[in-house]
Amino acid sequence: MPLRGEVPQLLISAGLSLLDEEGTPGLTLRRIAARAGVSHAAPAHHFGGLPGLRDAIATHGFRSFRHELVTALEGVPADADPFQHLLTVNLAYIGFARRRAALFRLMFDQLPTEDSTLREIARATYVVLRDRCTPFVRDRPAAPLQTSVWSMTHGFAMLNMDQPYPPESPVQVSSYEDALRLLVG
């Protein structure tokens, strides 16, 4: 029998496992509880119900996502061309979405949210990408450029999550670099 303090993490881990195997249809309180080896009432007790547990899973997802973005940037020398920093973080963004498609969808499906922890980590994750846009702002407003880069990257991520496209397709990740260069030009 798990210790009381371990139950929330067990439930999140079980939810992540079911999400990877079955997508969001697999996320029911009973199935998550059974996978975690706890009573079917435990998810409601610890998270207030399925929406709260989904927020907790999304929070975990954003933490992992942010960690991957930061880790990818650590592999780029500090004195590298700013475009290399921008490209690296955005390719890591697209890569996370491809590897963890169901989690990625859930993370963004949970937004906007009343959960302040989820809001904070989602914003902190966005800031990693946003800050890489700074060298390209020049004499234009920052917010539209940042939003455009994020929107394009998120769109590429969504398009590349589920279906393989033929090599000549314009949504191949290999064509992303050219599109990004054009955007930040």
Image: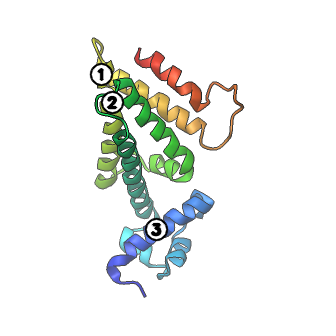
Name which of mark 3 and mark 1 comes first in the sequence.
3
Residue at 56 percent across and 72 percent down: it is 31
Q: Residues within 10 Å of mark 1 (few under 14, many from 20)?
A: few
Q: Name the quadrant containing residue 72.
A: top left
Q: Quadrant of the C terminus?
A: top left
What's the distance in space between the residues labelled 1 and 2, CA to CA?
A: 7 Å
Mark 2 highlights which residue?
A: 132
174 is higher (above) or lower (below) than 62: above
What's the distance in space between the residues labelled 3 and 2, CA to CA?
A: 32 Å
Q: Nearer the viewer, mark 3 or mark 1?
A: 1
Q: Amino acid at mark 3?
A: Ser
94 left or right, relative to 121: right
Determine which of the numbered discs, if any, sits on residue 13 in the image: 3
Residue 163 pos. (x, y %): 67, 41
Q: Amino acid at mark 1?
A: Pro
Residue at 36 percent across and 39 percent down: it is 73
Foreground pick, 108 / 9: 9
Q: Residues within 10 Å of mark 2 (few under 14, many from 20)?
A: many
Q: Is residue 122 visible?
A: yes
Residue at 33 percent across and 30 percent down: it is 132
Mark 1 highlights which residue?
A: 135
Q: Pointers 1 and 2 in contact (CB under 8 A)?
A: yes
Q: Residues within 10 Å of mark 3 (few under 14, many from 20)?
A: some
Q: Secondary structure at mark 1?
A: helix
Q: Secondary structure at mark 3?
A: helix
